[in-house]
Image: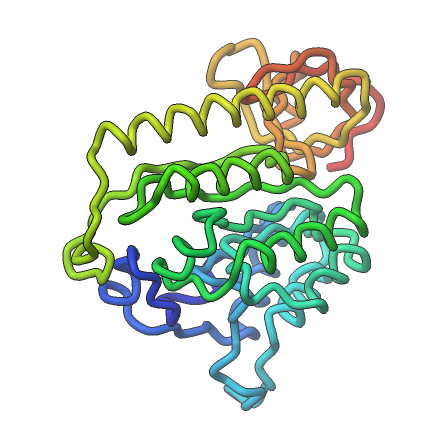
Amino acid sequence: VSIMRGCDNFCAYCIVPYTRGREVSRASSAIIGEVESLAASGVKEITLLGQNVNSYGRRSGGKEVDGATELSFTGLLKGVSGVKGIERVRFVTSHPKDISEELILLFGSEPALVRHLHLPLQSGSDAVLKRMGRGYTSGEYMEKIEKLKKLYSDMAFTTDIIVGFPGETDEDFESTMDIIKLVRFDNIFSFKYSPRPGTPASDLPDQLPEEVKSKRLAILQRLQREISMEQNISLVGQKKRVFIEGRSRNDAMEVTGRTPCNRVVNLKAPLELKGSIIDVLITDAFSNSLRGRYLGGDAQC
């Protein structure tokens, strides 16, 4: 469910503010109404979408729209989580500089809000983050990660990383690798920097050779595959609640679903369980997915 469009951040590498315009939030009453309609049709999991969901409603300043006071992002999350029939709520994408204490605490008070946070880092180097115009330091990023980890031991983190940003040194790249080792993300969406015409970064000096960017990306992705595999192995033998999404892409005799922390699980179970949340014992681990065994009993439909 889209909750906003555009972006006000103007990161040096990003074309979004120029192509989609400045940030505009949808009315919270319209969003909750859409979620209520989806829930009535049988939808159980909702993902709220925005370029920077944490700044949802910021421009409204609490004004009234169509007779209703607009909500903050945490207020919207509470409203969506309270819709009858909605059992899981997710959101993407968050900006590290806008993660509030109120949002952090909401993971502990709203049962429907899954403990998975996609929090783009982009770089572990403060010098690179400054040139990117990201508005936070690596220390500020880690402070929020550590607070979440301290409060919620089962919290899963994913992130975005750009390697080879103009001027990135070997030391800058190692700083990114250090944070990956510290956080141990469940997954990383990683990319080589690619200039976008019209963005400030495309005119920066010290553009890196393609072979340097490719080498660094390969090193980063190799490390993350190892971490993802270790994270998944640690789940073998555990029971998880899995939302069944449908037939597995790789095996027509299996179904596929996701844990609350967004890990993919494939298992043998009746296709009729699609749309149900069931108990699954994790039996095997792979770098990008898990295998499980349906424990039977009544599904939560």
Residue 91 locus on image (x, y percent): 56, 53
Q: Nearer the viewer, residue 117 or 162?
A: 162
Residue 133 locus on image (x, y percent): 38, 64
Residue 6 lies left or right of residue 209; in this view the side is right
Color encoding of the figure? rainbow
Residue 254 locus on image (x, y percent): 59, 13
Residue 220 lies left or right of residue 206; in this view the side is right
178 in relation to 56, above or below: above
10 in relation to 45, above or below: below
Residue 267 locus on image (x, y percent): 65, 15
Q: Give the residue at x 51% y 43%.
A: 159
Q: Nearer the viewer, residue 280 or 128?
A: 128
Count of marks, rendered view = 0
Q: Give the residue at x 25% y 59%.
A: 15
Residue 296, located in which quarter of the rendered image?
top right
Q: Give the residue at x 77% y 39%.
A: 154
Residue 272 lies left or right of residue 171; in this view the side is right
